[in-house]
Amino acid sequence: MVLAFIPLLGWSQVKSGVTYSEHPAYDVITKSYQIWESGTEAELRALYAEDAKFWGPGDEEPSNLDQEVSNMLWWQENFSDIKFTVMEGATPDIIKYENDKKGAWTMDWMVFSAVNKKSGVAIKANLHSNNYVTDEGKITVSISYFDRESAGAQIQNSFGIHRNGRVYDEHPFIDTLNKMVAHFEAGEISELASYFSEDADFYRLGVDGKLNLEERTATWHEAVAASSTRDLEQSGYPDAIYYSRDEGQWVVLSWWWVNNTNAETGEKTREYLHMSHNFNSEGKVSREIIYMAN
């Protein structure tokens, strides 16, 4: 039975081209790496078609040759010991498709490294590249894959620019904040208080000292009793920030126009409010800081 199926398996395979580990097309790519390491603008331009397209991770549009040259010159100006080395255990693949009479695709797996000239800090990133090289030895398409987040952080660090966290304009903690505001507008204070930890601290800029949850709950009840209408109009959009230091912490910053109507006089007021809320590991608010400006 096994022998009977072997011919069928053979017919299911379709050969579309030939793969090489050495090829003149990859000699062009090797030359491009050497130029990046220590070559000139003219040498780099000579390897590419004038309308060559360059794609990086996440790009929605390709960059052009002028941008690639500018990129290389920036690296050479700011970094030394620029090197492209073959990743351990990898070999390049060059594919010549049977129906392609114009050129070949090259694929390789490299390690890019460099040393910041001012700080001496080294960076290193794994790089996978696909390039199309014409039979005339011109690169027309270059597609690179690498961890942009890691590489960017290393570059910043080498210049002494240290990233302490990340900012998000959409996040579950922002959704929580909006629910808290909605409860306050509706006068649902017990529901609002449920979003805070029992040991939460409350601060109001310009006022000495802090309040605990029981004291803050009392001020919310006072605000509800004093106003017949509470309308918080969002100004801009909240930011959820994750700070990496101090074992990591989440903070949501938000800005609002507070439009209230006095319950006794009917007088309408409009004040500007900035709020900062820290969230603990259980997703509860552990600290609130507010600033109100007329």
Image: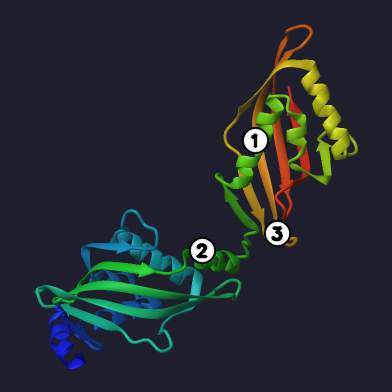
Residue found at x 75% / y 12%:
262
Report which quarter residue 15 is drawn in.
bottom left
Q: Are marks 1 and 2 in contact (CB under 8 Å)?
A: no
x then y, percent, for residue 168: 57, 48
Q: What is the number of the mark on residue 149?
A: 2
Judging by the rendered image, the residue that carries numbered circle 1 is 179
x then y, percent, for residue 282: 72, 53
x then y, percent, for residue 237: 58, 36
Q: Along the line of sight, which residue is nearer the eye, 130 or 248?
A: 248
- Classify the position of the C terminus by image quarter: top right
Q: CA distance from mark 1 to mark 2?
A: 32 Å
Mark 1 is on which residue type?
A: Lys
Report which quarter residue 239 is drawn in.
top right
Judging by the rendered image, the residue that carries numbered circle 3 is 248
Residue found at x 77% / y 21%:
224
Q: Looking at the picture, does residue 5 appear above or below residue 58?
A: below
